[in-house]
Every structure is written in structure tokens, then in C-alpha cells.
Image (cartoon, rainbow, N blue to C red):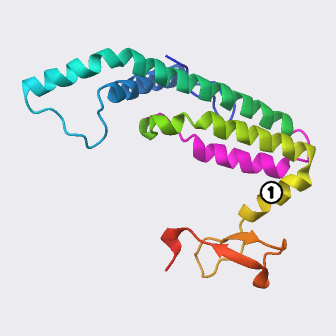
Amino acid sequence: MPPPFPSLDGAPPARGQADAFRALVLARSVDEAFKLAPGAPLPRTKAAFEALVGEGSPLIERATRDWANAVAVTSSELAATLAALKAASKGPSGAAAVRDIRSQLGHLFPANLIEWIPFARLLNYPRYLRAAQARLSRAVANPGKDAGKAAPFTPCGRPSSPGAPPCVTRRRRGSCGGSSRSSVWPSSLRR
């Protein structure tokens, strides 16, 4: 079983944490082998249970190998991204990108990630991390270009009502005010 994901703060995992992580990966692989999704009906008879065991048992090894490989690839890309962040944080040119990528990593890798993430989504994490590495190298090499590409997704900073989150503005002419902006709100905040 693979070790836990590298810590975002650089601290090594505790032994208990590593053991719990491995047990969680194993549990997720068994769930996948037996198709035990949350809310899936459980067998009610002995024959149904034996049929489920018969179908899932041959798949345990493959599912465990798939989960372990996905975690290992994601861990190596995360380690490379954290190393790139550490190197980029030494210079002033990529400071905004470093802050932004650290924030994104905090959202991508919560403490309970393995408990809930679908396997297909975990397979995409290395791609996300390579994109973060590419953005980081671009931010260090050309901070102006990185700021320009990130501008459409930066918060406007002016909430429309007290307590409302700031809008995310798609800037047409590089301005945040006036008629040169069109706000994009999450559907849960639209009235």
C-alpha cells in the first residue's frame, strides 16, 4: 500500500496517520471491487451475499493495485508541485501564484480526501498538479502574463450586499468597475 500524500506544510506523516491512510485506501479498493457505493442495496439473503462475494473476490487485487497506483502517481506529482512551490517562493516574481496554488492545494487535498473521492476523479489529480506546476513556472518566468491569465478569475472585491461573497469578474478591458465587467455568480447565489 502507498504511503499517505505528502503534507502541504512539509511535515512527515505520523505512523498512525500512515497506517490509517493505508487502511482507508484498502477499504476504498474493497468497496470498488464489490461495488459497495454509499446507498447501494446490501444483499438480504445468503445466496445474494455469496453471489456478491463470488463476483467481487476476484476483483480485489486489481482494484487494490489500481487505487495504490493512482495514489502513488498523485503523491509523486504532489511532491513535485510542493518542491516547485518551495523553489518559487524564494523569489518575488511568483508570490501571487504561489499563494493561489497553495490555496488550491488546500481545497484539492483535504484531510479526508480518500474517504469520499471517486476513483475516476482521483485519476485526474496528477493532471491538475501538472497544470499547477506549469502555471508556477510561467509565473516565475513571466509574472505579467500569469497575472493577465489569472485576472478573469480574481475576485472583484466588492460584494453586492452586506455579507455576500465577492463576485468573480470576467474583465474585458482589465477594469473591475463600470460597464466593462460581467459578473459570474455561482448558481446557488443567484436569485
Please tell me which residue lies in front, 179 or 114. Answer: 179
Residue drawn at x 42%, y 27% as measured from the top left: 24
Q: How many marks?
A: 1
Residue drawn at x 59%, y 47% as measured from the top left: 107
Q: Is residue 67 above or below residue 87?
A: above
The segment highlighted magenta reads: 89-114
Point out residue 94 in the picture as x, y percentages from the top left corner: 86, 47
Point out residue 180 in the picture as x, y percentages from the top left corner: 78, 80
Point out residue 73 in the picture as x, y percentages from the top left corner: 61, 25
Please tell me which residue lies in front, 23 or 36. Answer: 36
| Corner quadrant of residue 145 | bottom right
Mark 1 residue type: Lys
Helix, strand or loop under label 1: helix
- The answer to whether residue 21 is left or right of residue 52 is right
Residue drawn at x 53%, y 35% as measured from the top left: 122
| Corner quadrant of residue 57 | top left
For disc 1, the marked residue is: 149
* Magenta-colored stretch includes residue 91: yes
Please tell me which residue lies in front, 170 or 102. Answer: 170
Main SS category, magenta section: helix
**Within 10 Å of the Cα at label 1, are there few (<14), some (14-19), or many (20+) other Cα atoms?**
few
Residue drawn at x 63%, y 31% as measured from the top left: 7
Point out residue 142 in the picture as x, y percentages from the top left corner: 92, 48
